Image: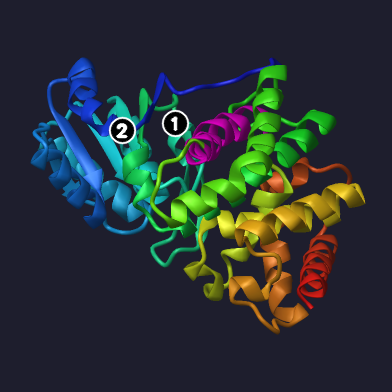
Amino acid sequence: MLNKIQFPGKYLQGFRALDELSGVVDFYGKKGLVLCSGSGEKILAGLAARGGRVLESVRFGGECSQAEVARVAGLVAEKKADVLVGLGGGKVIDTAKIVADKARIPVVIVPTIASTDAPCSGCAILYTDSGEFEGVTYQRANPEVVLVDTEVIAQAPARFLIAGMGDALSTYFEARSCAANRRTTPCGGLGTLTGMGIARLCYETLLSHGAAAKIAAENHVASPAFEHVVEANILLSGVGFESAGLASAHGIHNGLTALPETHAYYHGEKVAFGVLSGLVLTDADSDEVEEVYAFCEAIGLPTTLADLGLMGISRERLLPVAEKACAKESCLHNEAGEITPQKVLGAMLAADAMGRARKA
């Protein structure tokens, strides 16, 4: 099997990077269409107010589901768009990637929050209409352009950036497991030194700049620390997970989506608890476990089941989470040895107990 790494075609990040959008679209086609949420429409209106050319837009339906993909694909065909822009959060972005791939047209990704590493990757997560994880779909290529306007991202609630750090936190640990066990990565090959280096840099960036970036986000300021963490959340984590691999943290996240109580929590918040559970599952070094718990506590990521709306949950109700996490196709099996629902259940309960003990 070949070693493999994937990148987006171009990555542009900075203050008012959105001003470049119309030029980027014109480079790739003649008729651009923007898929965006209600907040994205306001951002486009702000761009128009300062003299930018605004492309035609359509409103996102709220869930990256098979039904929404079919609806947006119909709009792309009806409007004869030859470039699709996904402007918004992770589910808007993933829907745009899937639709553009099916239509075989370029996709330009403009994240409005830095809450996940979805923008740079060539894969997307599908959910049911009710929000339960359904599966992962892989596109033929990564986005042509990822355009990150840090003025826009700084205006979002700080919780989004923090959740993005939770998602990015998993990158190094999951990459490490995949490398040690020679597991296939999401881009269909074995990891590379470059991918592992990017994953390690992602973790180091979070530790160095995460706390300061949180303060900047709370004050809606795009400080240097904020810029560094946005890059870690979007670019380093995006390239790192896709080209170096996924393992227990995302497997446990997928399991947690089986419980309706967790649907109010962001992807990265659930992934962060998956990281802690994964460290228990893989018997990580105690100093490393301490470092990760301390980081999560410092920036406000979940460290207990109660932090995900699951206070007092019984073992019986948590067991289906572990079973879903251990589904045959789950990335959790990229960890070493035989992984069973009982082992995962025990790891989640142990991680929760450690988190509760540290809060006492």
Please state the horizontal and vertical placement of residue 166, each as a whole percent of the image.
Answer: 60, 51
Disc on the earlier residue, 2 or 1: 2
Please state the horizontal and vertical placement of residue 216, each as a whole percent of the image.
Answer: 47, 49
Please state the horizontal and vertical placement of residue 255, each as a whole percent of the image.
Answer: 64, 61
Relative vertical location of residue 144 with respect to residue 304 in this rendering, above or below: above
Q: Label 2: few (<14), some or many (≥20) within 10 Å?
A: many
Secondary structure that dominates the magenta span: helix
Relative vertical location of residue 178 with respect to residue 169 in this rendering, above or below: above
* Residue 226 among magenta residues: yes
Highlighted range, magenta: 225-245
- Identify which amino acid the numbered label 1 is placed on: Gln
Look at the numbered disc 2 and give the secondary structure of its residue.
helix
Relative vertical location of residue 102 with respect to residue 26 in this rendering, above or below: below
Q: Which residue is mark 1?
A: 139
Please state the horizontal and vertical placement of residue 104, each as a whole percent of the image.
Answer: 30, 26
Look at the numbered disc 1 and give the secondary structure of its residue.
loop
Q: Count the marks.
A: 2
Quarter of the figure with residue 147: top left
Quarter of the figure with residue 359: bottom right
Query: Image point 38% across, 63% down: which residue?
Result: 129
Query: Image point 25% across, 55% down: which residue?
Result: 39
Q: Is residue 284 left or right of residue 103?
A: right
State yes or no: discs 2 and 1 in contact (Cβ < 8 Å): yes
Work out whether residue 164 can be spotted.
no
Pick the quarter of the image with the C terminus: bottom right
Q: Which residue is mark 2?
A: 100
**Mark 2 and mark 1: Cα distance apart in space:** 9 Å
